[in-house]
Image (cartoon, rainbow, N blue to C red):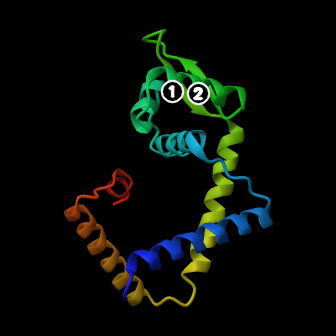
């Protein structure tokens, strides 16, 4: 492979376009940006039965207190989250997904599970293990070069 970065860029672009087309075909509307990040974060935390405060969102998204507060306020207005006052500290507010956003997350998960299955069709288990091994080595090489990425670190 002569130009791996070009191959990865094209592959990533192909996946992005395919997911957009397939989502549109299925009538799935994606939530991008910070609101989408918060919904995914809350979904993961709720699966672990962890309570989430606005300050947890600040830390997760690496944003200021005022930005996090305004973001959550918009999400409440959009019907994506609800707030509940802490019984121990009236200033602290727990942020929870609404049924609407939980339902959307289930739809997204089912959609991506189906896409993953289709992507891996006709891929041998052994080939997949080799592919994962190569990707892990590439990630290690990226770290050595100085391109450690928090997103990569969190997923491994």
Q: Which residue is mark 1?
A: 68
Q: Nearer the viewer, residue 25 or 88?
A: 25
Q: Residue at x 30, y 73 (%)?
A: 138
SS for tag 1?
Answer: helix
Residue 51 shows up from this direction = no
Q: Are marks 2 and 1 in contact (CB under 8 Å)?
A: yes
Residue 69 vertical position relative to residue 128 in the rendered view, above or below: above
Q: Is the residue marked by circle 2 packed among few (<14), some (14-19), or many (20+) residues within 10 Å?
A: many
Q: Residue at x 71, y 32 (%)?
A: 79
SS for tag 2?
Answer: helix
Give coordinates of residue 124: x percent, y percent: 46, 90
Give coordinates of residue 38: x percent, y percent: 54, 39
Q: Residue at x 33, y 55 (%)?
A: 149
Q: Is the residue marked by circle 1 packed among few (<14), some (14-19), or many (20+) residues within 10 Å?
A: many
Residues at marks 2 and 1, CA–CA distance in whole angstroms: 6 Å
Give coordinates of residue 69: x percent, y percent: 54, 22
Q: Which mark is residue 50?
A: none
Instruction: Give the position of the N terminus as an image quadrant.
Output: bottom left
Can you tell which quarter of the image residue 34 is in? top right
Q: Residue at x 47, y 16 (%)?
A: 92
Residue 43 shows up from this direction = yes
Q: Residue furthest left?
A: 144
Can you tell which quarter of the image residue 133 is in? bottom left
Q: Which mark is residue 72?
A: 2
Give coordinates of residue 16: x percent, y percent: 60, 66
């Amino acid at each position: 492979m002569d130009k791996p970065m070009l191959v990865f860029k094209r592959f990533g672009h192909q996946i992005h376009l395919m997911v957009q087309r397939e989502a549109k075909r299925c009538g799935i509307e994606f939530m991008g940006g910070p609101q989408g990040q918060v919904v995914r974060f809350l979904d993961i935390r709720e699966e672990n039965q962890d309570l989430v405060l606005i300050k947890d969102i600040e830390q997760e998204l690496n944003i200021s207190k005022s930005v996090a507060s305004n973001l959550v306020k918009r999400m409440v207005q959009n019907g994506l989250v609800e707030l509940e006052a802490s019984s121990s500290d009236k200033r602290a507010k727990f942020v929870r997904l609404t049924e609407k956003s939980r339902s959307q997350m289930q739809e997204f998960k089912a959609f991506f599970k189906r896409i993953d299955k289709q992507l891996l069709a006709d891929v041998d288990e052994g080939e997949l293990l080799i592919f994962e091994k190569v990707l892990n080595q590439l990630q290690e090489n990226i770290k050595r070069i100085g391109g450690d990425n928090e997103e990569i670190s969190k997923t491994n």
